[in-house]
Image: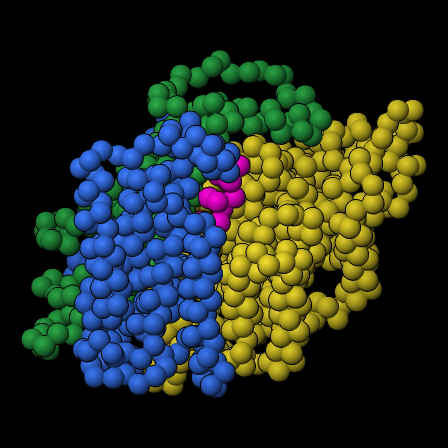
Chain colours: A blue, B yellow, C green
C-alpha cells in the first residue's frame, strides 16, 4: 500500500511542479494580473477609509469571509467543548475537591506573569484597536489576549480560573454584535455589512467608520474562542 | 431583494445566540432553530415569486463586483435553499439535550445556504469549511466513541480535500487575479490551459470528498455506519449535493471544456462500478445503502459530464430523485437496520413499510412508471446522442450497474416477503417520526410520477437559465467590465 | 529554466515542497499525531502558494503611510485570504486534536490501522453482521508509544 501511495506522491509532485514552473504568469516579466487587487488599492481610500488596505479587504470588501471564519472558530470551539465535556467536568469536580493537586508554578513564573499579564492585555488591545492603521487587527490581538489569559491559568491554576459561562457570553456577544453591525446597514436600505459612519480623518484612530468596531468584536471573539480552546485542551492534558 | 442575505445571516445569528438563550430556557433554545428555518422557508418562497424567470445579484457590503462578494440568486439556488431548510427541519434533533448541538445544526444550515447562494470562489471555500467543521462536530457528538473515530478519519480526508481546494483557488487567483465566478467566466481563455485545468481538477477532487467522489470516499461506510440514520439521510441526501453544487458552479460557468468533462466522466464511472460492487456483497442495510449512494453520485457526475444546460437539467433531476430515494431509505433504515436475515418476514409484519421500501427500490432501479426510469432513460439517450467511445462506455457502465443493483435489491425484497421465522423481529423500534417522513418521501415520488412531464419541463427551464454564463455575467458584473471584454 | 532561480522561483519551490511533504506524510504515516502534523504542513504550503500570488518584487506592504505614496504595493487580497485560511486551519487543527485525544482514550492506540480495524469490527457488530472471515490483522507496530499518559 505504501508503495502505491509513494507512487501517487511522486506523480503528484511532478504534476504540481510542472504546473508551477511553466505556466504561472508570475515567472514572466509581468506578475500576477492584479485585477481585483489594483481596483481595491485605488478605491480603498475613498470607499472604506482605512490606512491598512488589508483591513479594508478583511472587514470591508470580504467581510462575509471574516464572518464565516469567526463561525468556523465558534463551531470548532463548541465541538471541542462537546467532545471533551465529560472529562473536563470530572476534572472540574475533582479539582474542587483536592485543590492541593494543582500547584502554582515556581517563583519566577508567578512573578513574571504578574508583570507580563497587564502588559499583554495592553498590547493585545492596542493591536486590536489599531488594526485599521497598522499591521495587526482583531485576529492577532485576539490571540495575544487569549495567550495572556491562558498563561495566567496555567501558571497559577489555584488563584485564577476562567469562568466558562463568561467566555461563552463574550463569544456570543461579540458574534452577535458583528452581525448586528452588518444588519443595521441592511435596515438602512443598504447592503449587509456595508461600512457605516463617516470615514473620519484618514490615518487617525477615529477613522474608517465601523471598521474598528468590527475589529473589536473580532478581537473579543477570537480571544474568547482561543482561550476556551487552549484551556479545554490543557485541562484534559492534566487529567491523564 | 437585499434582505435575502438573511437566509444565511439568520441561522448564524441563531447559532451565536443559542448558547446564551439556553442558559435561561432550554425549550426556547430548542425552538429557535426550527423557527429560523421556517422564516427562511417563507423568505425563499417570496423570493421564488419575485425572481420569476430572471436572476438577481446581491452585492455584499455594497461593493460592486468584482471587488466585493456577490450572492447570486436564481431558481437553481433558491431550489437548493428550499431543500436545505426543509431537510434540516426534518432531521432536527428534537430529543438532544445539548444546546451546542443546536448551534452546530444552525451553523450547518447557514453554511449550506451560503454554498447555495455565493458566487465568489473563496467565499465558497469558507462556507465549505464551515459546513465541514459543523459536520465533524455533529458526527463526533454522537455518544459512541466509534463515531468519534469515524469523524476523525473523515476530518483527515476532508481537510486534505479542503487544502486541495485552496491550492486550486490559489492557482486560479495567480492566473487571473480575481475570485468572482462571473468575472472568471469572462476570462476563460486564461483558464483553459493546463494550469487552469489542473486547478479545476484540484477543486473537483477537493469538493469531491464531500460528494463521495471515487478516489476520496473511504470515509462513507465508516461514517454512515456509526451515526444515526437521520443524520445519514442529511449527509447522503443533502450535504453531498451541496459539494456537487460547488463543482457545478465552476464547471458550468468557467470550465466548459472537454478535458473537464472527461475527468468527471471517468471519476463517475469508477464510482459507479466500485460502489455497486461493494454494495452487492454487503450483508447489512447501512453498508448497502452507503455504497449504492456512492454509485449514484457517480451517475450524477456522469450526467454532469454531458455539460451545458442538458447536463445541468439531468443533474438536478438526479439530485432531487436521489435526495428523495436515499433520504427516504436512510430514514426507513432507522426502523429496520441490521443483517439482511433479520428482515425475513417484514412484509407480513408490516406490509406498509415493505411497500414503501419497494417503491423506493423500484424507482432507484428505474422501473417504468416511476420517476427513476425517466431520468435513467433521459440520461442514456443524452449520452448516446453525444457519441464517442467514453460516452458509450458510460452507457454500458450504467446498464451494468442497473443489473447488479437489480440482483442485490431483489434479493433483499425476496427476503422481506419470505415467511417469518417464529422468533424474528424485523422492526427494531416503535413508531418513529422519521418513518412518517419516509412515507411522505414515497408519496412525493408517486405524485411526481403523475406529473413527470410538467416537472421535467420546469427543471429544464431552470437549467437553461442557470447554465447560461451570459445571464450570469450580465447579472453580476457592472457594465464597465462587460465593455472590456467585447 | 533561467527564471527558476529568481526570488519567486525559490519561494514557489519552497511552498510547493512544503505541501508535497505534507501530502506524502498524509499518505504514508499511520500515527494520528503525525497525520495531524502532515495536515498542518500541507496547509502551510497551500497558504504560502496563495500568499505568493500577490507577490511583487520590491513591492511594499499595502498600508498607506505618509511617505509611500508613489511606491508599488503588494496585492492586499491574497494577504486577507491567507489570514482567513490560517484561522480556519487553526480551528480545524484544534478540533482534530480534541478528537485524537478522545480516540486515544477509547482505543488505547494512536495507530490508524489498529483504530480502523477496530472501528470496522464495531460497525459490523453494530449492524449485526459477523466481520468477514474475522481475519484480524496481526497487531501492527506502533510508531510512537504514548509515554506521557
Q: Which residue does the image show at 34% across and 42% down from the upper left?
A: A159
Looking at the rendered image, the quarter that the N terminus of chain B falls into is bottom right
Q: Residue at x 50, y 61 (%)?
A: B16
**Residue B210, position in %: x, y?**
52, 48
Query: Can I make out residue B277 in this image?
Result: no
Quarter occupied by residue B387: bottom right
B19 on left or right of B348: left
- The residue sitting at 75% across, 49% down in the picture is B434
Dominant secondary structure of the residues highlighted in magenta in the image:
helix
Which quadrant would residue C129 be assigned to in this image? top right
- At which x and y percent is residue B293? 63, 44
In which quadrant is the C terminus of chain B drawn? bottom left
Instruction: Identify which residue is drawn at 63% across, 20% down.
Output: C132
Relative image position of residue B454 (x, y in whole percent):
75, 71
Please indicate whether residue B220 sits to the left or right of residue A42 in the image: right
Q: Looking at this rendering, what residue extends furthest in the top direction?
A: C138
Q: As rendered, which of B97 and B352 lies closer to the eye? A: B97
Q: Is residue B291 above or below residue A182?
A: above
Residue B448 visible in the displayed image: yes
Nearer the observer, C7 or B382: C7
The foreground one among A127 and A37 is A127
Q: Disc count in the image? A: 0
| Magenta range | A75-86
Q: Is residue B52 magenta?
A: no
In the image, residue B358 above or below residue B46: above
Q: Residue furthest left?
A: C67
Would you say residue A77 sits in the magenta stretch?
yes
Quarter occupied by residue B354: top right
Amino acid at each position: 500500500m505504501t508503495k502505491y501511495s509513494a507512487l501517487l506522491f511522486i506523480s503528484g509532485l511532478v504534476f504540481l511542479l510542472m504546473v508551477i514552473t511553466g505556466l504561472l504568469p508570475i515567472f514572466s516579466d509581468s506578475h500576477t494580473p492584479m485585477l481585483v487587487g489594483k481596483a481595491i488599492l485605488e478605491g480603498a481610500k475613498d470607499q472604506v477609509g482605512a490606512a491598512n488596505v488589508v483591513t479594508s479587504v478583511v472587514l470591508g470588501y470580504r467581510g462575509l469571509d471574516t464572518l464565516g471564519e469567526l463561525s468556523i472558530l465558534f463551531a470548532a470551539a463548541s465541538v471541542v467543548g462537546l467532545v471533551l465535556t465529560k472529562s473536563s467536568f470530572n476534572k472540574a469536580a475533582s479539582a474542587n475537591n483536592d485543590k492541593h493537586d494543582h500547584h502554582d508554578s515556581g517563583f519566577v513564573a508567578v512573578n513574571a506573569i504578574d508583570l507580563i499579564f497587564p502588559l499583554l492585555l495592553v498590547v493585545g488591545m492596542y493591536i486590536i484597536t489599531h488594526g485599521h492603521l497598522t499591521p495587526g487587527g482583531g485576529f492577532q490581538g485576539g490571540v495575544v489576549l487569549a495567550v495572556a489569559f491562558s498563561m495566567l491559568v496555567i501558571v497559577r491554576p489555584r488563584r485564577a480560573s476562567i469562568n466558562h459561562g463568561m467566555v461563552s457570553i463574550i463569544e456570543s456577544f461579540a458574534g452577535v454584535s458583528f452581525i448586528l453591525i452588518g444588519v443595521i446597514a441592511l435596515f438602512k436600505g443598504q447592503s449587509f455589512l456595508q461600512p457605516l459612519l463617516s470615514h473620519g480623518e484618514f490615518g487617525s484612530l477615529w477613522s474608517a467608520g465601523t471598521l474598528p468596531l468590527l475589529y473589536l468584536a473580532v478581537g473579543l471573539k477570537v480571544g474568547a474562542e482561543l482561550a476556551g480552546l487552549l484551556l479545554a485542551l490543557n485541562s484534559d492534558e492534566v487529567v491523564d | 431583494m437585499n434582505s435575502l442575505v438573511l437566509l444565511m445571516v439568520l441561522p448564524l445569528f441563531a447559532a451565536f445566540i443559542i448558547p446564551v438563550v439556553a442558559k435561561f430556557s432550554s425549550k426556547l433554545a430548542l425552538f429557535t432553530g426550527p423557527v429560523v428555518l421556517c422564516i427562511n422557508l417563507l423568505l425563499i418562497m417570496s423570493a421564488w415569486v419575485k425572481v420569476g424567470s430572471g436572476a438577481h445579484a446581491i452585492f455584499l457590503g455594497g461593493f460592486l463586483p468584482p471587488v466585493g462578494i456577490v450572492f447570486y440568486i436564481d431558481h437553481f439556488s433558491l431550489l437548493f435553499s428550499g431543500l436545505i431548510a426543509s431537510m434540516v427541519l426534518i432531521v432536527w434533533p428534537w430529543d438532544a439535550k445539548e444546546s451546542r448541538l443546536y448551534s452546530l445544526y444552525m451553523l450547518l444550515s447557514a453554511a449550506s445556504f451560503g454554498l447555495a447562494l455565493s458566487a465568489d470562489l473563496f467565499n465558497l471555500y469558507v462556507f465549505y469549511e464551515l459546513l465541514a467543521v459543523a459536520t465533524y462536530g455533529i458526527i463526533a457528538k454522537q455518544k459512541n466513541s466509534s463515531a468519534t473515530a469515524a469523524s476523525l478519519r473523515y476530518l483527515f480526508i476532508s481537510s486534505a480535500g479542503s487544502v486541495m481546494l485552496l491550492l486550486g483557488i490559489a492557482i486560479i487567483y495567480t492566473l487571473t487575479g480575481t475570485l468572482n465566478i462571473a468575472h472568471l467566466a469572462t476570462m476563460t481563455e486564461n483558464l483553459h490551459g493546463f494550469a487552469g485545468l489542473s486547478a479545476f481538477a484540484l477543486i473537483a477532487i477537493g469538493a469531491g470528498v464531500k460528494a463521495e467522489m471515487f478516489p476520496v470516499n473511504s470515509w462513507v461506510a465508516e461514517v454512515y455506519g456509526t451515526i444515526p440514520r437521520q443524520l445519514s439521510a442529511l449527509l447522503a441526501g443533502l450535504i453531498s449535493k451541496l459539494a456537487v453544487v460547488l463543482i457545478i458552479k465552476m464547471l458550468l460557468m468557467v470550465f466548459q471544456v472537454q478535458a473537464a468533462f472527461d475527468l468527471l466522466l471517468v471519476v463517475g464511472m469508477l464510482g459507479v462500478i466500485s460502489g455497486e460492487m461493494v454494495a452487492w456483497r454487503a450483508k447489512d442495510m447501512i453498508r448497502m445503502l452507503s455504497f449504492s449512494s456512492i454509485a449514484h453520485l457517480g451517475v450524477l457526475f456522469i450526467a454532469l459530464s454531458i455539460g451545458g444546460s442538458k447536463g445541468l437539467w439531468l443533474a438536478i433531476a438526479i439530485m432531487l430523485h436521489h435526495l428523495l430515494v436515499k433520504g427516504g431509505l436512510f430514514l426507513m433504515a432507522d426502523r429496520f437496520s441490521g443483517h439482511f436475515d433479520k428482515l425475513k418476514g417484514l412484509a407480513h409484519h408490516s406490509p406498509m413499510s415493505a411497500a414503501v421500501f419497494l417503491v423506493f427500490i423500484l424507482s432507484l432501479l428505474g422501473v417504468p412508471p416511476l420517476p427513476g426510469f425517466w431520468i435513467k432513460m433521459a440520461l442514456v439517450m443524452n449520452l448516446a446522442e453525444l457519441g464517442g467511445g467514453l460516452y458509450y462506455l458510460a452507457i454500458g457502465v450504467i446498464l451494468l450497474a442497473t443489473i447488479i443493483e437489480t440482483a442485490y435489491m431483489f434479493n433483499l425484497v425476496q427476503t422481506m416477503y419470505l415467511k417469518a421465522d417464529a422468533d424474528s423481529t424485523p422492526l427494531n423500534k416503535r413508531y418513529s417520526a422519521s418513518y412518517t417522513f419516509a412515507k411522505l418521501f414515497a408519496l412525493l415520488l408517486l405524485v411526481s410520477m403523475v406529473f413527470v412531464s410538467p416537472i421535467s419541463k420546469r427543471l429544464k427551464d431552470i437549467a437553461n437559465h442557470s447554465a447560461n454564463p451570459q445571464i450570469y455575467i450580465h447579472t453580476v458584473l457592472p457594465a464597465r467590465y462587460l465593455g472590456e471584454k467585447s | 529554466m533561467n527564471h527558476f532561480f529568481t526570488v519567486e522561483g525559490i519561494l514557489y519551490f519552497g511552498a510547493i515542497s512544503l505541501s508535497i511533504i505534507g501530502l506524502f506524510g498524509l499518505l504514508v504515516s499511520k500515527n494520528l499525531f503525525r497525520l495531524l502534523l502532515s495536515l498542518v504542513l500541507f496547509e502551510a504550503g497551500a497558504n504560502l502558494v496563495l500568499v505568493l500570488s500577490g507577490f511583487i518584487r520590491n513591492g511594499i506592504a499595502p498600508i498607506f503611510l505618509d511617505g509611500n505614496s508613489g511606491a508599488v504595493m503588494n496585492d492586499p487580497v491574497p494577504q486577507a485570504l491567507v489570514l482567513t485560511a490560517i484561522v480556519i486551519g487553526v480551528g480545524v487543527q484544534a478540533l482534530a486534536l480534541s478528537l485524537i485525544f478522545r480516540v486515544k482514550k477509547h482505543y488505547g492506540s494512536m495507530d490508524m490501522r489498529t483504530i480502523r480495524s477496530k472501528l470496522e469490527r464495531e460497525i459490523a457488530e453494530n449492524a449485526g453482521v459477523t466481520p468477514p472471515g474475522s481475519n484480524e490483522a496481526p497487531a501492527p507496530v506502533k510508531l510512537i508509544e504514548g509515554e506521557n499518559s
